[in-house]
Amino acid sequence: MTDTFEKSAGRIRGFAVTRGIPKASLREAEPGSEAHFDPHVWFDVKLWMKSVDCVREELTNLDPAGGEQYRRNAETYVKELGALDAEIRAKLLTVPERQRVLITSHDAFGYFGRAYGYEVRGLQGVSTASEVGSPDVQNLARFLVERRIPAVFTETSTPEGGLLKVLETCGSDYKHRVKLVGGENALFSDALGPPNTPGGTYPGMIRHNVSVIVEALTK
């Protein structure tokens, strides 16, 4: 996508909304990745709040007459996101500490884990294009068994086949049953839900994910 924006620079105006986030706050991508940093910054709500000023600034540059309205809207939205961060932080703390382990199809939730105190493992790396091999499946299966993890989570934008192989290995090799959380409870990672649904907005997407995670890991 970066290459697409660069090639279209003369025709399409694009802005990096994360430019206000200090590089020291970014997670480095896994070795061998084409990306320098993990792009999934939106899963740390406080970090994502820093993008609001960039959006306000660019909209004001494009439409100076609407600058005051953009300023007021930005202030309102930042307050909403601050309240959202406090809300989900309190909810996530209701999960017993030893059960705060989030296993997903790919490594999209590193910022989430760092911000809210959860250990995160992905079958794939930061990129969904990375390959999944037998050692990856075996290693994750052993981790699930050793830590007695009760559930793993599929994502709306990533196939669940790899996780199914992990769960098959858990059952056949270790006799450990793990619940696969998916379907309407799949986590949003690289996309929002359809318009006019709870997951169709950023706050709604975050609330959906947190509710699913807490319910699955608490039972």
Image (tube, rainbow, N blue to C red):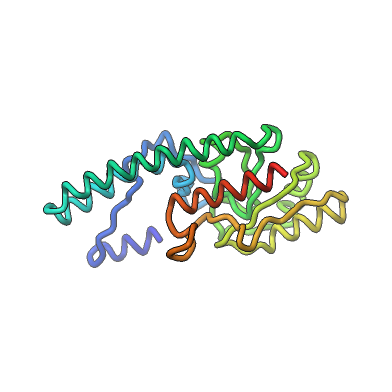
- Residue 208 appears at what percent x and percent y? 54, 52
Measured as percent of width and height from the top left, residue 78 is found at 34, 41
Q: Is residue 195 visible?
A: yes
Q: Residue at x 45, y 60 (%)?
A: 200
215 with respect to 80 (left or right): right
Which quadrant would the N terminus be assigned to in this image? bottom left
Residue 164 x %, y %: 73, 60
Q: Residue at x 29, y 65 (%)?
A: 8
At a point 43% along the width and 64% down the height, the residue shown is: 196
Q: Is residue 97 left or right of residue 169?
A: left
Question: Can residue 31 be seen in this snapshot?
Answer: no
Residue at the far left: name it.
65
Left or right, residue 68 beside residue 41: left
> Is residue 56 rendered to the left or right of residue 40?
left
Determine which quarter of the picture holds residue 63. Answer: bottom left
Residue 2 locus on image (x, y percent): 38, 58
Task: Say which quadrant the C terminus sits in.
Answer: top right
